[in-house]
Amino acid sequence: MTSLPVIAIDGPAASGKGTLARRLAAGYGFAHLDTGSLYRAVGLSVLRAGGDPADEGQALSAAQALSPGDSVLTDPALRGDNVAHAASLVAAMVEVRAALLKFQRDFATRPPGGRGAVLDGRDIGTGICPNAEAKLFVTASVEVRAERRVKELQAAGLHAIVEIVLEDMKARDERDSRRAVAPLRPAVDAFVLDTSALDADQAFSAALTFIRSRIGPA
């Protein structure tokens, strides 16, 4: 049986990869998975249980309890900065990543709709789907990303100060790029797309040109 096409999109927080992934999935009629939501869901589950997301045992229990239809995967609280911090902690844990690995690979090989899959995260092209037909690494300067995150939080009615968000984002980038397990980095065959000076339409156009060269038109 011929495998279905997979588009792998990686990059740091607020780089624009999520918006891009959703647009590409809609354009191609592929299923979309925001893999970061899995780690956020684990972090949120631990926090709501009154636990410590830095505790590997608690994080692993939450990861093992996660299922595809779990309501926590679409909970609005996932977007909070405290949950983002918790997600970054649990994502560095070997056993947690192993527990969620099958979840992600099953989605890629048997996506809902049966046409193809778009997965976005931090190690899709390097770890989860290293044989993906098309790989992108979406990035932007940390200052631009911090401003984007503040606007996103304010639009959701949450108070945010750019200086605090910037420092938190720098610390998260450091953790994600230096962790021993699946560090944040572009795959050697990924198309690196810097969105610092691009709007959503320009980023989509550049990505689409690359995707078409790999899997053809939608």
Image (cartoon, rainbow, N blue to C red):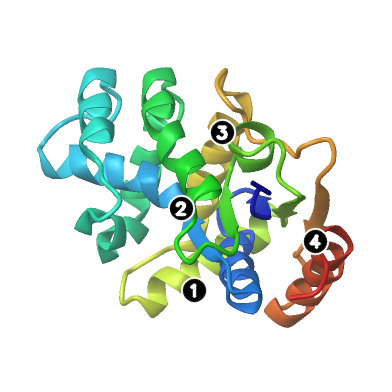
Query: Where, by quadrant of the figure, is residue 154 drawn?
Result: bottom left
For disc 2, the marked residue is 164
Badge nearest the viewer, 2 or 3: 3
Tell me the CA gap for discs 3 and 1: 23 Å
Report the amino acid beneath label 1. Lys
Q: Position of residue 198 (x, y in %)?
A: 77, 73
| Discs 1, 2 touching: Cβ within 8 Å | no
For disc 1, the marked residue is 151
Residue 61 horizontal side relative to residue 146, left or right: left
| Discs 4, 1 touching: Cβ within 8 Å | no
Report the amino acid beneath label 2. Ile
Under circle 1, the secondary element is helix
Tell me the CA gap for discs 4 and 1: 34 Å
Rendered residue at 26%/45% (across/down):
67
Which of the two residues, 31 or 162, is positioned nearer the viewer here? 31
- Earlier sequence position, callout 4 versus callout 1: 1
Report the amino acid beneath label 4. Ile
For disc 3, the marked residue is 176
Residue 68 horizontal side relative to residue 113, left or right: left
- Earlier sequence position, callout 4 versus callout 2: 2
Rendered residue at 35%/47% (across/down):
40
Badge nearest the viewer, 3 or 4: 4
For disc 4, the marked residue is 215
Report the amino acid beneath label 3. Asp
Tell me the CA gap for discs 4 and 2: 41 Å
Q: Quadrant of the C terminus?
A: bottom right
The answer to whether residue 30 is above or below residue 5 is: below
- Earlier sequence position, callout 1 versus callout 2: 1
Badge nearest the viewer, 4 or 1: 4
In the rendered structure, find residue 2 and report the number of the disc placed on it: none
Residue positioned most to the right = 213
